[in-house]
Image: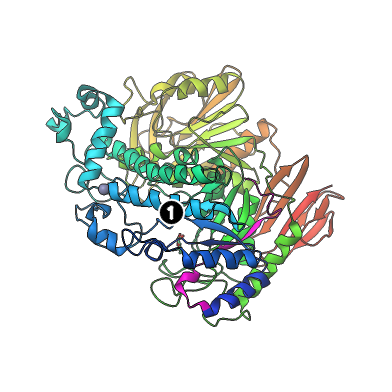
Amino acid sequence: MNTSKLPKMLYGGDYNPEQWDRSVWPEDMRMLRLAGMDIATVNVFSWAMLQPDETTYNFETLDDIMDMLHKNGIFACLATATGAHPAWMARKYPDVLRTDFDGRKRKFGGRHNSCPNSPNYRNYSTLLASKIAERYKDHPALLLWHVSNEYGGDCYCDNCAAAFRVWLRRKYGTLDKLNEQWNTRFWGHTFYDWEEIVPPNALSEQWTGDRTNFQGISLDYARFNSDGMLDCYKLEYEAIKRHTPDIPVTTNLMGTYKTLDYFKWAKHMDIVSWDNYPAADTPVSYTAMTHDLMRALKGGAPFLLMEQTPSQQNWQAYNSLKRPGVMRLWSYQAVAHGADSIMFFQLRRSVGACEKYHGALIEHVGHEHTRVFRECAELGGELQKLGDKLLGSRLPSKVAIMYDWENRWAIEYSSGPSIALKYVDEIHKYYDALYQLGIQVDIVAFDDDLSPYDIVLAPVMYMVKPGMTERIEAFVKKGGTFLTTFFSGIVNENDIVTLGGYPGELRSLLGIWAEEIDALFPGDSNRIVMKDSLGALKGEFKCSLLCDIIHSEGADVIAEYGDDFYAGSPVVTRNRFGAGEAWYVASSPDAEFLQGLLSALCAERGIQLLPGKQPGVEVTCRVKDGRSYLFVMNHNANAVTVTFGEDYGTDLLTDRAVSGDTQVEGRGVMIVEAS
Ligand code: GLA
Ligand code: ZN
């Protein structure tokens, strides 16, 4: 993104002055400046104001907002306002309303309430984006475009059904091919006419939640739904680009949100942005992982933190406050993982409706003498001091974790072997082990280049897409270390089982055959019994969830199951393949085992641990122009002592020289530029 207009980290957030009397606007501006803010995301929910009826457009208020921002030295992240359609549109053109999973036609209300395949929604949203782009293309406040808001959800209406059939024809060409790939001879579901195909919701193939009778159709519908919403985004994107080819366009994503395939989306975004709303009990390593996933979407390029709350949310069950220092700490956590902005929802707390108890820079009291404001203003001052130092810097990594949305859909649509199997949780277990060791990780897509890495982990790689096996084999042959787990290599991209024994195409790479898959009840476990020690890893550990019963076909057996009728059969194996090795972990191990295993693998490959790591302390490293910046974030409430090398560098936040033992206060942060 071209940040030359603003050579520092963007600081600001969602701002809805059109929801307020103009008499408060000057106070808003004064307080935003006081907090050191320089960007406001405006116009997110203004469609009803901008277009009060089908033929009238009125931009007067938005003109004034844009001018006011500019006069106050604040840039606009200008939204296209299409995240919620106006009431008149729902009444006049009911095709904009969605049909939900249970088959109920929605009425006006809610927010992400437009059918992605509604001709009227597509037409009017594109038109609005185009009018806004044309009007503000030369406005000096314009810095960034924000299309719609948090795309999500799904629709099962007749327009979607028709569009789904078109999508399927394009994908399969013939009904014969579709019938084969969906295995429709099962239960006699063979289709003889495209018109017989209906969306797989509660009225047809799908049960509540994720379960479905036919994974093929449900998986394709998930892809189709993600693609349909992406098409809506692309229509607006293209309309905007016709007027402002050089201004970056984004839409705010939602981390591990399941419904949209963000790797596909990111190809059409100039810069990734996302909204980070961890709960008080979300593991900090989960948030770290999510930032890394967002950074992965554009191959490691920096992203924008578009939203976070300065204090509390309203939509969780228990909306506790961010404790003093936590907003700052979590803001820097985003930066530490690749964010080039810190932005909030919201700048002024609304007076009515469901977000009036959502935290804001400006609270209901209306002045700046609040804890939240003070903390925000202090952070604003620090960001000014940091200037452009970190902008555009990258996070080098030798370890990658593979992640894929379609794989997740397929795993969780699968009927059996266990409802407890959650893809993101398994990814997080491996991520957390590396995080606890102080090893920086890249997340990569299933089709990303693996060559920059020494170690590639692919937990629960259930779906193997065309070409993947060859690429992973080539990576290992050249000397790479690859690791995958239970329930991997099972199906192709349409959820059709690869016959001839699990793990399918990966069998020769891994040197094993998985004969059966056992599902353990909650609370039950088996044991991983190490045959010899591996680095410091020895003895016994717990494993649970699923247990693949495997046979070695050339792989070394590193550990065996300790219990049940398959006690003594392999649970962890290593297969030498070319110059590298391929590991199989046949069950879901406890954290202690994973840390031990990954520590041993990283040590073998000479992968360096970042300095400063200890319990509750997070470390990452960003680099730019040959300079490196070590982030040390103390998530503990109490101070800790971190040991650096002699004359290690300078803390950019305090300008203090950093050398040897150094205190980091509770919830404190250091950004140390290495000397
Ligand atoms: C989302 C939305 C915002 C707001 C916040 C509240 O991120 O994009 O408009 O509703 O949630 O947390
Ligand atoms: Zn629809």
Mark 1: which amino acid? Ser
In the visual, does 627 lie left or right of 667? right
Q: Pinpoint residue 114: horizontal percent, then vertical percent.
A: 31, 54
In the visual, does 47 lie left or right of 72? left
Q: Is residue 235 visible?
A: yes
Q: Quadrant of residue 161?
A: top left
Name of the residue lying farthest toward the front: 55
Name of the residue lying farthest toward the bottom: 365
Q: Which residues are magenta?
A: 1-22
In the visual, does 90 lie left or right of 188? right
- Seen from the viewer's position, the closer of residues 385 and 131 is 131
Q: Does the Cβ of the disc 1 residue fall within 8 Å of ligand 1?
A: no
Q: Which residue is mark 1?
A: 148
The residue positioned 31% from the left and 59% from the top of the image is 54
- Seen from the viewer's position, the closer of residues 631 and 269 is 269
Whether the magenta-drawn stretch holds residue 121 is answered as no
